C-alpha cells in the first residue's frame, strides 16, 4: 500500500497514498507480538487482524465527502483494471467517471500487533505495507505523521483519519526510503487508503497474521 502509493505519488507528482514515516523494510511473513506487552496489560481491542473488501466506489465516496477529491487518483489505482504498474495516472482516466473499469471488491487486511507494529496484506496474504503505531487513548492511535480515531464493536472496526491543519503539498512531513521529501498531502492520501473511513473492517479470527490473544487464536 505505502510502497505502491509512494511510487504513484513520486512518479505522478500528484498530491498524497503513502506514509513516509520510515524506510520500507523487506516483506515478512508475520510479526510476533512482544510477549512482555501482551502479558503486562490487557490487549487493546484494536490489536488483531482486520479485513475489508476494498472498492473504488467506497474510497471515491469517502474522499468526495471529505472535500479531498484531488487525492482520488492517488488512492484508486489498485482498484482499477489496467492501471499502469508504475502507478502513473493513465491518460484515458476520466475524473468525471473515476471508477470506470473498476475491479470487483478485493480483500485487503491490516494487522495491529501488540508491540506497536502494523502490517497490511493483499488478497493473497502477501505483505504490502508496514509501519508502527502508538495508542493515544481508547479511541485514538497515531502513526508517526498522522493520527486516526478508531472504534471497535465486537468483531467490527471503523477507522477515521484526523486531517491535520494546513495540510498542503508544500508542508513536508518526512522522507521516503529513497530520501525524497513527502508532503502532508501525500501522507494524508496514504492515511485514507489505509483507513477507508466509513467502511467496516471485520476481525480475522485465525491465520498466520492474527496476534496471539485475539480472535479465536487466543
Image (spheres, rainbow, N blue to C red):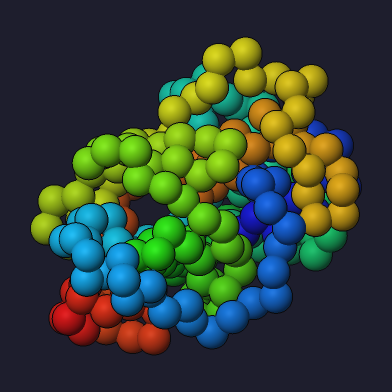
The residue at 51%/44% (across/down) is 143
Quadrant where the N terminus is found in the figure: bottom right
The residue lying at 43 percent from left, 59 percent from top is 116
In the image, residue 35 lies at what x, y percent? 32, 76
Camera sees residue 59: no
Residue 148 locus on image (x, y percent): 41, 37
Image quarter in which the C terminus is found: bottom left
Up the image or down, 170 lies above or below 40; here it is above
Above/below status of 200 relative to 34: above
The vertical placement of 196 against 47, above or below, is above
- 119 vs 128, left or right, is left
Q: Is residue 71 visible?
A: yes
In front of the other: 98 or 199: 199
| Left/right of residue 145 with respect to residue 118 in the rendered view | right
Identify which residue is drawn at 23% across, 56% down.
Answer: 44
Q: Which of 80 and 160 lies nearest the eye of the viewer?
A: 160
Residue 104 placed where, x, y %? Answer: 49, 64
Residue 137, located in which quarter of the rendered image? top left
The foreground one among 203 and 45 is 45
**Of 126 and 78, which appears nearest the observer?**
126
Amino acid at each position: 500500500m505505502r510502497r505502491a502509493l509512494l511510487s504513484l505519488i513520486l512518479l505522478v507528482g500528484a498530491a498524497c497514498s503513502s506514509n513516509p514515516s520510515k524506510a520500507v523494510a523487506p516483506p515478512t511473513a508475520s510479526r510476533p507480538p512482544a510477549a512482555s506487552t501482551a502479558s503486562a496489560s490487557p490487549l487493546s481491542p484494536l490489536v488483531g487482524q482486520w479485513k475489508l473488501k476494498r472498492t473504488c466506489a467506497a474510497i471515491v465516496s469517502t474522499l468526495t465527502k471529505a472535500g479531498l477529491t484531488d487525492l482520488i487518483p492517488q488512492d484508486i489505482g489498485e482498484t482499477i483494471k489496467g492501471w499502469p504498474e508504475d502507478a502513473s495516472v493513465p491518460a484515458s482516466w476520466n475524473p468525471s467517471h473515476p471508477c470506470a473499469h473498476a475491479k470487483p471488491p478485493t480483500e485487503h487486511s491490516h494487522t495491529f500487533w501488540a508491540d506497536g507494529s502494523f502490517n497490511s496484506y493483499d488478497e493473497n496474504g502477501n505483505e504490502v505495507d508496514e509501519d508502527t503505531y502508538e495508542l493515544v487513548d481508547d479511541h485514538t492511535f497515531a502513526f508517526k505523521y498522522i493520527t486516526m480515531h478508531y472504534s471497535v464493536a465486537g468483531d467490527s472496526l471503523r477507522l477515521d483519519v484526523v486531517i491535520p491543519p494546513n495540510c498542503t503539498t508544500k508542508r513536508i512531513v518526512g522522507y521516503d526510503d529513497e530520501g525524497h521529501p513527502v508532503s502532508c498531502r501525500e501522507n494524508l492520501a496514504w492515511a485514507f487508503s489505509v483507513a477507508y473511513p466509513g467502511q467496516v473492517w471485520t476481525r480475522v479470527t485465525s491465520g498466520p497474521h492474527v496476534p496471539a490473544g485475539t480472535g479465536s487464536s487466543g
